[in-house]
Amino acid sequence: MKKILVTGAFGQIGSELVPALYKEYGKENVVSMGHSTISLGFDGTLEKADARDKEALRGIIKKYDIDTVYHLVSLLSAKGEVDPSLTWDINMNGLKNVLDLGVEFKLKIYWPSSIAAFGPTTPREDTPQHTVLEPTTMYGVTKTAGEGLCRYYNVKYGLDVRSLRYPGIISWKTPPGGGTTDYAVAIFYEGIKTGKYECFVGPDTMLPMMYIDDAIRATVELMKADLKTDSWNSYNLSAVSFTAKELEEELRKYLPDLTITYKPDHRQKIADSWPKSIDDSQARKDWGWKHEYGLSEITKVMVENLKKVLA
Ligand code: SER
């Protein structure tokens, strides 16, 4: 039976991946690790440790006889610009530790990359799998470097490490947490709570987005897939692209009195450096990826859930 460790378990992805892994592999086989917060009502096995502490990680891997790690620890793009050195430290040294321990304990590893691996010199429409990777945020730099590191460990040591380039993830269980794409989450929180939202990117800003359930399913499916490719990829992954204005209009169907103002700040530049849409045909071909949620489905499920949670 699999013995799974999830690092960064209490962040946006982790707090929904952990319950999905409970369902798939049994609660008794999943250990959730956080560096400060360990809460969110998980009633499974919890560990507090910093992924930069290799000995602490080694101890947890030995203690539970771990064979699979989902390494989700990361500072996101906007937050990452506040302290670029810390972002490098957390994002890269945590990953390097996990990869080294992966070789030592023959682990299977999942690590998320992002659309932030791309930059202003990348073709912005239908961004291909293989293209220019010249990011201009520290978060993006750690994603590009992280992909390189994963590829290296795969080629050099035969490590089974798998990766997806997530688009902006829209979810309701955790509040927006320092990402550039988080306006597409915050608009729901603020819209439902106050009827108003001041959006930090302009109305025409278009980015690739995905509902959390699709992202979690993609992650679980990729890890289960019998991958038949010879070259290592962090897979482009796509669901839907829409502008901030299109999201506003869709949300207004549920909140007719909604007032959205647009006040672009420094995050506009980050958004403008990322793709508008992604070509994920390789993921669709290699392991059968297929998304389920479009803009109207995402809006409906976000409003339904957040209305309950924020009531
Ligand atoms: N959601 C992330 C961010 O905005 C992108 O990977 O930082």
Image (cartoon, rainbow, N blue to C red):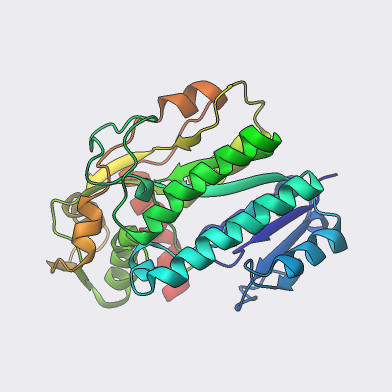
Image x and y of residue 83, in percent: 38, 74
Across and down, in percent, residue 239 comes to: 38, 38
In the rendered image, residue 15, in percent from the top left (x then y), is placed at: 58, 62
Q: Quadrant of ligand 1?
A: bottom left
Is residue 169 shown above or below 152?
below
**Outermost front residue:** 156
Question: How many numbered marks are there?
Answer: 0
Which of the 4 quarters of the picture holds residue 36?
bottom right
Q: Is residue 67 shown above or below 190?
A: above
Q: Is residue 11 visible?
A: yes
Q: Quadrant of the C terminus?
A: bottom left
Residue 274 percent location from the top left of the image: 27, 47
Q: Nearer the viewer, residue 292 or 148?
A: 148
Can residue 253 be seen here?
A: no
Please name the residue shown 39% across and 37% down the image.
238
Q: Is residue 179 shown left or right of residue 191?
A: right
> Where does the N terminus fall, quadrant-wise?
top right
Of residue 37 and residue 306, the one placed in the foreground of this image is 37
Residue 149 shown left or right of residue 143 in the figure:
right
Residue found at x 58% / y 67%: 10
Query: Who is closer to the viewer here, 213 or 125?
Result: 125
Residue drawn at 50 percent across, 30 percent down: 289
